[in-house]
Amino acid sequence: MQNAVATFSDDNPRLAQVYFYLTDYKNKPLDQAAFNNMDQYFQKLKQYHLQAVLRFAYIWDDAE
């Protein structure tokens, strides 16, 4: 995330579109590790004063 923030810093972005790919959870409930990972990401967004439009997907390739 730090590289993306640096790349677009001149534009002063305040909103990011974020995809969480939940491929490993296609056939099972989200566990605490998944929630911890998302929370870490949210903390980084907060650190950079960014808001996010969240998107969740269970596959990253439509061919699956």
Image: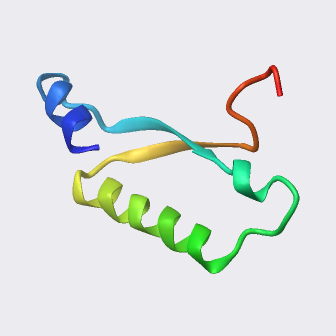
Does residue 38 appear to the left or right of 55 in the view shown?
Answer: left
The residue positioned 51% from the left and 62% from the top of the image is: 38
The residue positioned 82% from the left and 52% from the top of the image is: 26
Q: Position of residue 37 (x, y in %)?
A: 49, 66
> Height in image: 16 above or below 25?
above
Residue, far right: 27
Q: Position of residue 46 (x, y in %)?
A: 31, 59
Q: Quadrant of the C terminus?
A: top right
Does residue 60 appear to the left or right of 5 in the view shown?
Answer: right
- Which is nearer the eye, 47 or 62? 62
Q: Quadrant of the N terminus?
A: top left
Q: Position of residue 5 (x, y in %)?
A: 21, 37
Q: Quadrant of residue 57?
A: top right
Q: Quadrant of residue 24?
A: bottom right
- Which is nearer the eye, 15 or 36? 36
The residue positioned 23% from the left and 51% from the top of the image is: 48
Q: Position of residue 12 (x, y in %)?
A: 19, 30
> Height in image: 64 above or below 5?
above
